[in-house]
Image (cartoon, rainbow, N blue to C red):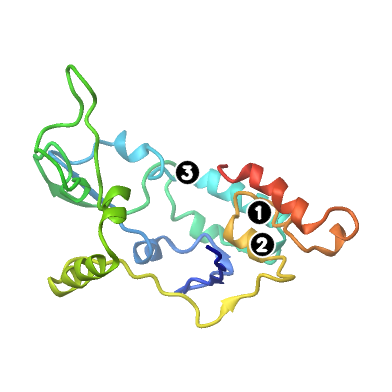
Amino acid sequence: MAANAISFANPMPDVYDILPPPLAELDNVLAFIYTGPCHPHEKDLRRTPLLVRRNKVKKALEWLKLNHESYADLNISHENLQEYPISGCPLVYAFRMSGDPQATEALPDNDDGLEDGTSNGQCSFTVHGLVGEDLETKPWDTLKSIAIRHLTESKKILGIGHAENPESIYHNTHLYPQMFSWLFPYGKGSFDQSAHAGVISTKAHKCWMLMYHDK
């Protein structure tokens, strides 16, 4: 089998040239729902990724502006920074009371209603959705029927929009730093850069980068 992969830009409701955004706007892009028998304790709200420390945000933005070429024109708003907590959760969270041993949205199809873990024997194995054996044993027409039935029963689906035109994968030095920012913290070192001509081939560069695929 041979296939080609293309990349599309995800739709961005807002592109900020001033960071951090006003605290009031965080609720437009982030949602936090806490499910459990009681409200989250203060120490629960101080755990990653809920923990936000104003000084850490300030230092991170200053580092990006100084070291990352895509953030060179960034404006750091100290006024917005003052709205963020010195340490804690900046979001307003929604709480849902639940006494179930497991969260309903995290239950597997074969859940038996018991709590996770075991006192003896083998550990429980959680299955979400279809596994490989189901896909291999069911013919294509059956899979299509299952998908159509899922839609006609108004069950949940996930849809992710994208830009109308794909991104160019040739001589686009910003593509990979934008897709894999953790591999390019300085926004440099991508493929097909003029500085690499005669120094390292694109093939050798990609083989080298694959060594960091799991980072």
Given the image, on which type of amino acid does mark 2 rest?
A: Tyr
Dot 1 alpha-carbon crowd within 10 angstroms: few under 14, some 14 to 19, many 20 or more: some
Place of residue 186 in the rendered image (x, y in percent of width and height, measured from the top left): 70, 53
Place of residue 48 in the rendered image (x, y in percent of width and height, measured from the top left): 41, 40
Asked which secondary structure carries label 1, the reply is helix
Asked which secondary structure carries label 2, the reply is helix
Q: Which residue corresponds to mark 2?
A: 71
Q: Which residue corresponds to mark 1?
A: 64
Q: Quadrant of residue 198?
A: bottom right
Place of residue 172 in the rendered image (x, y in percent of width and height, measured from the top left): 71, 70
Picture layout, residue 164 above or below residue 211: below
Asked whether the residues under the numbered discs 1 and 3 touch, taking CB atoms below 8 Å apart as contact, a structural biologist would say no
- The residue under the point 67% across, 52% down is 184
Give the numbered dot on residue 53. Answer: 3
Left or right: where 3 falls relative to 144: right
Given the image, on which type of amino acid does mark 3 rest?
A: Arg
Q: Quadrant of residue 142?
A: bottom left
Q: What's the distance in space between the residues labelled 2 and 1, CA to CA?
A: 6 Å
Q: What's the distance in space between the residues labelled 1 and 3, CA to CA?
A: 17 Å
Q: What's the distance in space between the residues labelled 3 and 2, CA to CA?
A: 21 Å
